[in-house]
Every structure is written in C-alpha cells, then in structure tokens.
Amino acid sequence: MSQAPQMPEADREGIVADAPMGNWVDRFAPGPTRPYLRLSRADRPIGTWLLVIPCLWALALAGGAGGFRPWDLWLAVSCGLGAFLMRGAGCTWNDITDRDIDAMVARTKSRPLPSGQVTVKRALLWMAAQAGIAALILFTYNRLAIGLGAASLALVVIYPFAKRFTWWPQVFLGLAFNWGALLAWAAHAGTVPPASVALYLTGILWTLYYDTIYAHQDREDDALIGVKSTARLFGEATRGWLWAFFALTVLSFGAAVILAHIREGRVLALVVSLGGVWAMGWHLAIQMQRLKLDDPASCLAVFRSNRDAGLIPLPFLAIAAWLG
C-alpha cells in the first residue's frame, strides 16, 4: 500500500501541532501570510462555524416569527464574514495574552507567538486590521445591532483572562461566542425579544458542553501550570455534567422555538422547528456515546462534530419559517 505523500521539510516549517493535517493554510497560503492566518485559526475553521451558527439560528427563527426580507441575505452573508473576522481577531488577542502559557503546553507551544514566528507588535496590528474590517460590516446594521456589537468587545477582551480567576472560563466563552444570537436577531427585527434571549442561553449551554470536552485535551498540562477550566473542576464527574448541559441545551432551544412561534399560533412551524431541536439532541446523544474523555483524539473529534450538530436544526428552522 502506498503511503500518503509527505510535505517537503520547508513546507512543514511553522505548522501548528493541533491544526488539522493538510489544511489549506499549510498547503496553499503564501508563506509570509501563514503565521498570521494561523494566529486567526484560519487553519481550523471549526471555531468560525461555532461562532456563526447561533447567528444563523437567530436569523431563521426571527424570519419565521416575522417573515424574511431581501435584507436577510446580506445579514446571513455578513454574519459569516463577521464571524470569520472577529473569531480571527479574538484568537489573535487570546494568543497575545496567553503566549507565555501556550509556551508551556505541548499542544499550543508551536503556535506563532510562543514559537517566535510573529512578534507581539505585529500580532496587535493584525488583530486591529481584522477588527476594523469587521466594524465596517457591523456599521451596515441598525443602531441596536451596532450597539450590541460594540458591547460584545468587552466579552472578547475579558475571556482570555477568565481561566486565571475562575473555574468556569467556558461560561465567558459562551457569553462571547453566542452574542450573535442577540445581534443577528436585532439586525433582522430591530428588537431583542424573549425568544432571542432563550436562544442566547441555548448557545451558552451548548458552549459549556462542547468546550468542556475540548478542555479535556489539556487537563494535565493545565493542572501543572495552574490554568482553570470546567474539565479540571468536574474531573471524574465530567460525563454527568455533560449530560446535564446537553439536556439543558435541548430544553432551552425548545423554549426559544416555542417563544418564537406560539404567539402567532404557527403550530405546524412549531412542530417542524421542534423536530430540528430533537435531531440536534439525537446527534449530541451519539456524541456522548462516542466520547472517551481520557483520549485527547476522541475529545477533539467529538468537539469538531459540534459543527454538524449545530447545522442540523437549520433546515428545519428554515422550512418552519417558510410554512409560517
């Protein structure tokens, strides 16, 4: 059996240990751009998916509650662009603040800052450039959405420090990563109704679920250097906590759907939407069956599969909106 082709030694220079092998940055991006794209995690798109999915949930549910408009096409596209840019800016900021910690963790010491591929000054300039372009997109929205977008910056700034002062940094990640549920709904409808708040809570609970799994990859290194996480806090009880977060995610999502549709009496749309929530729950239950918390490769694979879990409800929500 022939072996998979190996990258030339020169092309392997600077590759980050925890990035997927053969990703597009390592294979196709021009050499000088690679360290900056790696700072932005462009070599691993899962984070962008997890950031944009709550926005798409919100647009689909808001459209079902109040009807879609041509403007919503731009909102969907711009949410994707904004998620890519702000995730990149946030990851760059995270790496700036964590560069000394990352240098002590096997999985992260090859990242551009701790490995010396990029200086802190250049990383700051790269972060500002990404945030600036994202701001131009935000300014096409209504005033409420612009205000919400500006307010989210406080969460982005605080998150990297959370693991230094709380055992629950995943809560801060959830607060930041799912803000788009509020922002996208506001951009569509000009309001932040109870359904959007329930959807925001859904995203936070879902983040607690998947990021606790992710954190189990670094539990031993985190213990050595004193970094806090829910993975370390829960320890051997983690699986029970994950089942609880899974159940609460499904219940909260169901509440958001009910709040969005029941007021207008859209019974068929409600049933279809709840079918999407059930399908996502089914996928999460399968994840729990596959998960081996003592195996970093299993944790990473299950974490990444949450992109599919989050996408599953979208066609149901879209069909429900059309039915409404």
Image (tube, rainbow, N blue to C red):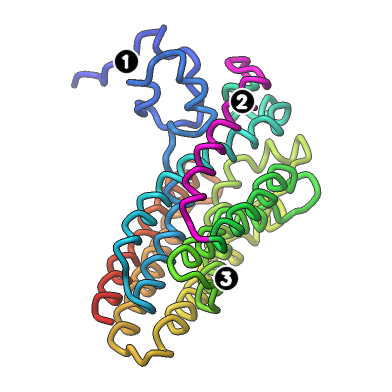
At x 38%, y 79%, the residue is 65
Report the side of 162 relative to 231 (left or right): right
Q: Amino acid at mark 3?
A: Ala
Examine the rendered structure and indicate whether residue 184 appears above or below residue 50: below
Magenta stretch, residue numbers: 115-142
Mark 3 or mark 2: whose residue is earlier in sequence: 2
Mark 1 or mark 3: whose residue is earlier in sequence: 1
- Which callout, 3 or 2, points to the residue nearer the camera? 2
Q: Amino acid at mark 2?
A: Leu
| Mark 3–mark 2 distance (CA, rounded to whole Å) | 41 Å
Report the side of 164 relative to 299 (left or right): right
The verdict on residue 123 being magenta is yes
Q: Where is residue 93 drawn, in percent x and y?
A: 64, 35
Q: Residues within 10 Å of mark 2 (few under 14, many from 20)?
A: few
| Mark 1–mark 2 distance (CA, rounded to whole Å) | 34 Å
Mark 1 or mark 2: whose residue is earlier in sequence: 1
The residue indicated by pointer 2 is 125
Picture disc at residue 244: 3
Do we see residue 248 in this rendering?
Answer: no
Picture disc at residue 6: 1
Secondary structure under tag 1 reads loop
